[in-house]
Amino acid sequence: MEKITFREKLGYGFGDMASSMFWKIFGMYLLFFYTKVFGISPAAAGTMFLLTRIWDAVNDPIMGLLSDRTQTRWGKYRPYLLWGGIPFALIGVLTFFTPDWGENAKLAYAYVTYTLMMMIYTVVNVPYASLLGVMSPHPKDRNTLSSYRMFFAYVGSFITFMILQPLVDAFSSSGSTGDQISMEPGAWTAAVAVIGVLCALLFFLCFRWTKERVKAAEESRNKASVGTDLKRLFTNRPWWILLASGISALLFNSIRDGVALFYFTDYVTSTFRTAAFGWTVGTIYLLVGQASNMIGVALAAPVANRIGKKKTYLGAMVLAALLSCFFFMLKPDQIMLIMIFQVVISACAGIIFPLLWSMYADIVDYQELKTGRRATGLILSSSSMSQKFGWAVGGAITGWLLAAFGYNADLAVQSQSAIQGVRLMMSFLPAIGCVLAIIAIALYPLGENKVLDITAQLNKRRAANG
């Protein structure tokens, strides 16, 4: 089989770089934007996140089924990167536009634009995820491609965190506001538009530089009904286990990410800006996290290739859970310790996500061996589905908990109850997600030897069918 070139690995990484630039804006800034800039309550935003993201997660398998049945001269999955890049950017900008309407009308606008944004994200990202299953049949290649994917995803996030705040301040009519990011609505829209143009370009390069190589055995190419594909998926035990683990891991990430800016705005009051770029300490915290994520991604493939994906995943989750609990004890003036904990916790998170994507690709092979049907798009769509379910529940819980702890966006100084709640949401509460992920992955049955055996059997079958 043709060797995967460095340019192709780079191109594949560019796809998630583009997705992640908007995804991290949604995860880290959107609740902050909706409550502080757009003008809706944390509870209303939390409910909106839950409803729209659950609807969006349900769309993922539908998109997987559709892409599995797509036939073009460019392949099954790559065309969606070409078709969806520009709508992705445009709808993202509309999501961060603030109309001069009343609260109820603005809430309806938020529901519509955010729902559309998540749907176009699905149209692009599910086929993109499915590319992993058809670029190479080799498990180690998939580990490498997953690592490139996640590394560049975090590069995209890093760039977003590095430029979003300065862009917002630059587009603000009043310029830099000192120790906080500008709250001027038009400045946010313009800043996101700049990032949207870059995202569209990266999707196009991903389309141009990647190839679809893996062709299923003849019996796997036979048409199967949607009901048959879904029935086979729902009886796939490793899929259920990995789905549960992925949702739990995202629950951990989404709660910590969603409340981070509140933590620094309202608890760590000694905010400052660097002389060179004008970053707040909250922005620096996010940048440190993304750089550490990239370190974790770089470690994922070599460590997993040596000791196995399952053991690597378990170790990273255990360490993240422990450190997250200790995070509660940090004081607002312990900036250096806060950053050190962020480095290690984020590195652990960086390790697990490439492994999840690679394990989903292994499940595609497992199901093909059992059933003779290769449903790459459907199964790989479940990885983004678990991601969205995790963010749906985590985002909703974040908004609801802020409201339950008495957080009031109109107050310059929050109550002790609200601040205590924000601290819990950075420590003990997300650690529960880690524990659930550990329990699930401990039951995962596809170890390294099992995966290699499946690959060997499939190669024989494909060779026999020409």
Image: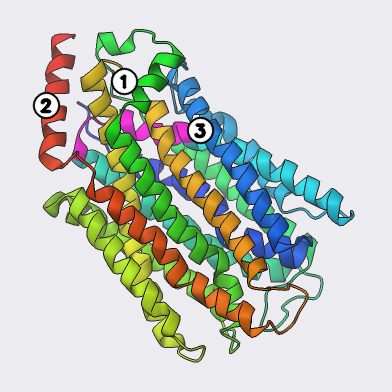
Dot label at residue 456 = 2
In this picture, which residue range is highlighted in magenta? 126-139
Taking the image as drawn, is residue 24 in sight? no
Q: Disc 2 on helix, strand or loop?
A: helix
Relative to 442, 395 lies left or right: right
Relative to 403, 446 lies left or right: left
Q: Residue at x 64, y 44 (%)?
A: 51
User: Is 148 one of the magenta-colored residues?
Assistant: no
Q: Residue at x 32, y 37 (%)?
A: 360
Relative to 171, 216 lies left or right: left
The 10 Å Cα crowd at callout 1, few under 14, some 14 to 19, many 20 or more, is: many
Coloured how? Answer: rainbow
In the displayed orientation, state which residue is furthest to the bottom. 333
Dot label at residue 60 = 3
The vertical placement of 452 against 182, above or below, is above
**Mark 2 vs 1, N-terminal side:** 1
